[in-house]
Amino acid sequence: MAVVVNHELCKGCQICVKACPFQAIDFDDVARKATINEKCTACSVCISKCPFKAISKDETDAVDLSAYKHIWVFAEQRDGELMGVAKELIACGRRLSRDISADTKCYALLVGNNLDALGQEAIEWGADGSILIESPLLEHFNTDGYTKVICDAIQEMKPEIILYGATHIGRDLAPRVAGRSNVGLTADCTGLEVDLEKYKAYCAKETTLDLSTLEGEDPNDKCIKQTRPAFGGNLMATIVSKKTRPQMSTVRPGVMSKQERVPGAKGEIIKVTPKLEESDIRTKIIKIVKEAKEMVSLTDAKIICSGGRGLGGPEGFKLMQEFADKVGGVVGSSRACVDNGWIGHEHQVGQTGTTVKPDIYFACGISGAIQHQAGMKNSKLIVAINKDPDAPIFGIADYGIVGDLYKVVPMIIEEWDNFSTAL
């Protein structure tokens, strides 16, 4: 959608030139007219500033929003196993689809080979159906192949919304699909809601909303509000995509809650035979080597024992490991400890680490910066241990203990059996 200048209305005042934040307006001193150049991002600042209404958006290439329907969830799978974030997003997609309209469906999008079993599993986790894009060339993830077949499917089937997990694969794939589809992408979302402001009164009476039954339906009212942390987590930005489709978001694992699996659930299976040749894939997998190391599954942990700068050094994580072993949990960490090299990044909880929702989160020697809180504040029970009574972590903790963690934690370990029985 381009911004254009009507030269018959332009008076050569140059207000738009001064107002443009991207230097996207050239001015012809001879003709005394303004012209939009290739730097334009269609931000509309010039349109609002022009006193003569000489600047507008060319709507001739606008997307027909009504042609797009249904929600797709990229159901990431590895070696035939559906990833946890896919299950979370299926539940989220199902909720959003019901908020949009009664006939909007949530489909799990699976890419790979021999996907029948996974397609059924996705339906059991809440999807209305599964779209299976199968080819031997897609057996293992490769950016070129996955991007091409998903973009081809988008052009043919026109989904309204596509959700991806913000995993290594999702963060590689989503921006490439968005770029090739000429749409925006909101990354690392922590909240997704359907923008149905004008129908709030109606929604208060009904659990589902069929927009087709209402007069004056506006496709823009079905935009999703995509909320993500901005400026280092110091504020939350809500983003909408009003002019393009599909709307695309990546969501961090652990942010959404998955629903109960229903064995034997019925749903639609759509098989897609992609147009894919070996020449479409610029890389070749020679060998897959899996690193042999202890895996840290923070997103699935019921109890997390996290240590922060208050540990004083890497040796402090020996106590955290002892603590985790006793309570049946895993060891977490603040970013400060990872940056100092005290523990690996796979243990990091927070905005730039892993988002978690355990039953119990022990924050030991963690001050509770907003970036860390963003990754653990939804824990069911938060226990904070810190010497500083004014530490921000106490603001969100269910239980706070002001004291030396090297004295408090051993006491909890000693009394854990009695404590866990009480729980």
Image: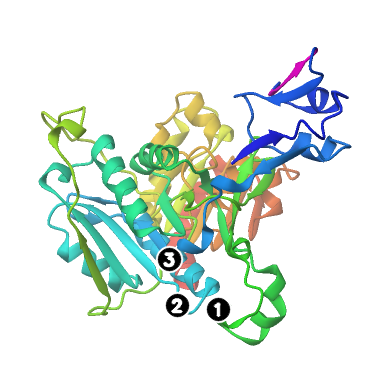
Determine whether 107 is above or below 44 in the image. below
- Examine the structure image and report whether residue 352 is included in the region drawn in magenta: no
Apparent side of residue 353 relative to residue 394 in the rendered image (left or right): left
- Helix, strand or loop under label 1: helix
Q: Which mark is residue 142?
A: none
Q: What is the residue that sits farthest to the bottom in this orientation?
A: 205
Q: CA separation, marks 2 and 3?
A: 8 Å
Number of residues whose C-alpha sits closer than 10 Å to that of mark 1, classed few (under 14), some (14–19) or many (20 or more): few
Q: Nearer the viewer, residue 110 or 159?
A: 159
Q: Position of residue 68 (x, y in %)?
A: 46, 61
Q: Nearer the viewer, residue 298 or 74?
A: 74
- Helix, strand or loop under label 2: loop
Residue identified by numbered label 1? 212
The quarter of the picture where residue 215 lies is bottom right
The quarter of the picture where residue 378 lies is bottom right
Q: Would you say residue 408 is visible in this rendering?
A: no
Q: Amino acid at mark 2?
A: Asp
Q: Residue at x 46, y 64 (%)?
A: 92
Q: Residue at x 40, y 58 (%)?
A: 158
Name the N-terminal-most of marks 1 and 2: 2
Q: Which mark is residue 103?
A: 2
Residue identified by numbered label 3? 70
Specify start and end residues of the magenta stretch as a single range: 24-29
Q: CA separation, marks 1 and 3?
A: 14 Å
